Amino acid sequence: MSLIKLSGGRVIDPANGVNDQVRDIWVRDGYIVAAPDGNEKVTAEYNISGRIVMSGAIDMHTHIGGGKVNIAREMLPEDHRGDTVERTELTRSSCGHAAPGTLAAGYRYAEMGYTACFEPAVLPINARQAHMEMGDTPMVDTGGYVMLGSDDFLLRMLAANEDQQAINDYVAWTLNATQTVGVKVVNPGAISAFKFNQRKLDLDEENAYYGVTPRRILQVLSRAVHELGVPKPLHVHASNLGVPGNVGTTLGTMDAAEGLPIHLTHIQFHSYGTEGDRKFSSEAARIAEAINRQKNVTADVGQILFGQTVTASGDNMVQYRNADHGSPKKSVIMDIECDAGCGVVPFKYKDQNFVNALQWAIGLEIFLMVDDPWRVFLTTDHPNGAPFTTYPHLIKLLMDRSYRNAMLDTINPEARAMSNLGSLDREYSLYEIATMTRAAPAKLIGLADRGHLAPGAAADIVVYRENADPERMFEKPELVFKDGELVVRDGRIVKVVRGNIHAVKPEFDIGIEKKIQPYFERYHSVRMSNFKISNDELCECGGGTKLIPHACKKRG
Amino acid sequence: MTNEATSTVMTEVACPMCGHACDDLSVDTAGASLAVVAKGCERARSSFARLSTVGDSALPRIDGKPVSLDAACAEAARVLGAATLPVFGGMALDVGGARAAMELADQAGGVIDHMNNEFGWRASRVVQDGGGINTTLAEVRNRADLILLVGTDAVSAQPRFFERCVWVGETMFDLAPASRRIVYLGGGLDTAPGVSPDGRQPDVFEFDLMRMPEALSVLNALMAKQPVTGEAPLGIALARWQELVDALFAAKYSVVVWAGPAFDAAQLDLNVGAVVSLVRKLNVTTRCNSLPLAGNDGDLSMGAVHTWQTGYPMRTSYASGAPKFDPVHNGITRLLQTGEADALVWLNSLADHVAPPACGVPTVVIAPPSQKLDGEPHVFIPVATPGIHHSGHFVRTDKVVTLPLRALRATSLPAAETVAMSIAAKLREVRT
Ligand code: SF4
Ligand SMILES: [Zn+2]
């Protein structure tokens, strides 16, 4: 039994409507509890008066594990050279900047006050590896969104006009078999289309072999996720990523959900028009307006920040097309197992490059023009827009208008002229930052005991020393507790722990295996029994990680 | 289907005996040794039989004398603690073994280098220099209409390649498996498996494998519509080369298969780079992908874990306390020859066929009891094999699929990861 008291901190806990109120927080055996009655012995007390207290931050979209991330690591020794993590008495050695090793990633996330990270692109057939990598990412809870939509099994179901119920069973079966917490679709149907040598696929364009459109895939998957009662809305990497004029596709993608919950990821890359001499312009205003109006829509930004990074995506069609823009110029593109694909292209965003500078401005415009911090999430699509270690800088850009405008003055002037960023006065408050990095992602993913500080919550707690410079404040919390244990002090690891793994367990008719099993035997390279990851095996893959299963309540 | 509750035959067993990682084997566990009774190949049959019978009762040894596991681990820790640069070779491990090896090597300040890595690091360098366009086994099985084997017959490395990926019963996409075109580039290969079920012979471009760089240059030049000198490059009529190039352009989904160890090591970068260039050219108008064959002896399992934990591939030195990657400097054969390395740990759980090099430095061997040895090492610790004695995970040739390995038979031998973690714990004591 342990009882910890954090005394006198200024608590910011948007999930419970608490905004900068001085409160004591009590922690017993890893959970936040109400103040105990009189005589219980306090095992540790931390006087944190004057400090800001928030729950642990949650990165709801970060590429931290799985095949394509490991390709990026292998491909980029130059990325790692200047960024090593030395072995200490407590921690192992590791390295990497944009494509860090799992050990470096876990330590750095914790040192920045993050206590949970979600890998958004788990290929079903690669799920085991993704879990092994996440299991080797210390300090943080993990979970994955499983990628569907270009897998031949689903496309065959759609081509055969199978009913929604059968699709729901398949989606639920996949979530269980891969031990994931949500469903993602990447460039719907296009990864398959690329294997048939199609080079682009618009929202209403048919896959050459299956005759299925991206819109149809979005409809059935968003419905499946909703009806199964999976809390996390369908996670959508929309069609035509990066293409000037893709705003129409993006708005159409929102419509394809037909009012059901839908999450558009790295929406910055999907908010482009074709105005101006360069035929590339910001459509952030239209995108923000659409999000503000349609309450079923959420989005994360995928902000780009200037510097060297690497893009790692399931979208092999787009990554192949962009491979020549890579810097340094090298790329790995893969077709994967009648299941998915991937593409890895290093990239350097330059502030004097017109397109990059405008992308930077577009991301910030979206942040500032979406009214509701519960429906817009702070991401760089690590590492695609920038490494996650840039988050404190990004927070400063959102919180400090004069700093933002000073930076705006330094970017490519043509891009500056085409952005309304300078006219946006909004400055995010600490309460709004806490919403978008804690309360909102926990609610979106359905993590009832994370992202808040009320009794019953897991004691993932971060204590910050307030600083007029938010970047300084957020890059180095004073204390971080993970499940009630003090793991970071003054931005340094003081204890290495293993996080939990979150997975949803939607119900389904096991009869679906009568279709899936023969499919594996007839066409696949593995057997269904070896594809599925059991709870026990998951914990072994994770090197001993604890599984936190989340039940789902059927809807509709 | 067998009823596993009553039968001694386990079905859908995954095999770690080569990088293909077939997972359809039936293994009878009743006899004195494990018997692969359905699916599998000769290599699987003999490996399961051998590794499952070897001395359950084998004891750890120091200088040839039996000792307790604890004493052997303590001595191994003492050797590592006394070394300035210990090197870790063999490394035929599954994921669990590799994880423990990483912990130990980091703590000991050593270098890990898999026994197949003389090829592996060069293949990695090609990825670092330019990348590639690759595919995986199920895509080959369902889509490949033309398979070009560059310098390899595939089956020497991975015996069931044709059975499982090429001459299959059916494909998903209106492609009759028997209609696939098979082309071999290079002489001295076992081309019999390339004969189609209806008796169609494969195309064989016969030439000395050492001339592979020239052959690939001819193909790349013709693809780029550049002039090629001579009527018959490498003794093969130019028209045949041209016809192959035309066929590759006409194919809907061609696959170029290569295997690092099939190339002369010094030519590996050149050949793989040329394959990548050829594949890139074809993708401008059609689809074509490489399929590297690797994963044998767990090299991709070890390599994947090494890369994901620390960011760098193998041949990274942990001596300074932070990872330093230098694949030219850190080859352990070189480090042993120059005397920079002063201790050797030979760590295997999946293979026993390559003996540790005789090197004159204190040597600790952690391996199956059947491990080939040219002399008695200072410390020998027998261990179990994942997929036979205990569960585990194995990364397949395409670096995408990881198969679960099963425990088929009890043993008193410890797992390699147990031994490595025990040495790491003792090393911590030695150091403090
Ligand atoms: S081909 Fe390889 S994996 Fe398959 S059964 Fe033979 S040895 Fe095992
Ligand atoms: Zn992403």
Image (cartoon, coloured by chain):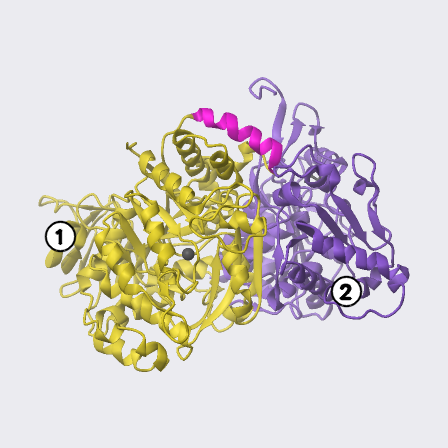
Chain colours: A yellow, B purple
Can residue A487 be seen here? yes
Left or right: where A236 falls relative to B317: left
**Magenta stretch mostly in which secondary structure?**
helix
| Numbered badge on residue B222 | 2
Q: Which of marks 1 and 2 is in front?
A: 2
Q: Give the range drawn in magenta.
A: A510-524
**Residue B66 coordinates in the image, percent (x, y):** 67, 43
Q: Badge 1 local density, few (<14 within 10 Å), some, or many (20+)?
A: few
Q: Quadrant of ligand 2?
A: bottom left
Res B388 quadrant in image: top right
Whether the magenta-drawn stretch holds residue A22 is answered as no
Labels 1 and 2 in the same subunit: no
Q: Is mark 2 within 8 Å of ligand 1?
A: no
**Amino acid type, residue under disc 1 in the picture:** Gly
- Quadrant where the N terminus of chain B is found in the figure: top right
Q: Badge 2 local density, few (<14 within 10 Å), some, or many (20+)?
A: some
For the point 49% across and 54% down, which residue is it? A315
In the picture of the structure, the residue carrying the numbered disc 1 is A17
For the point 13% across and 63% down, which residue is it? A49
| Chain holding disc 1 | A
**Amino acid type, residue under disc 2 in the picture:** Leu
Res A550 quadrant in image: top left
The residue lying toward the viewer, choosing from B107 and A289, is A289
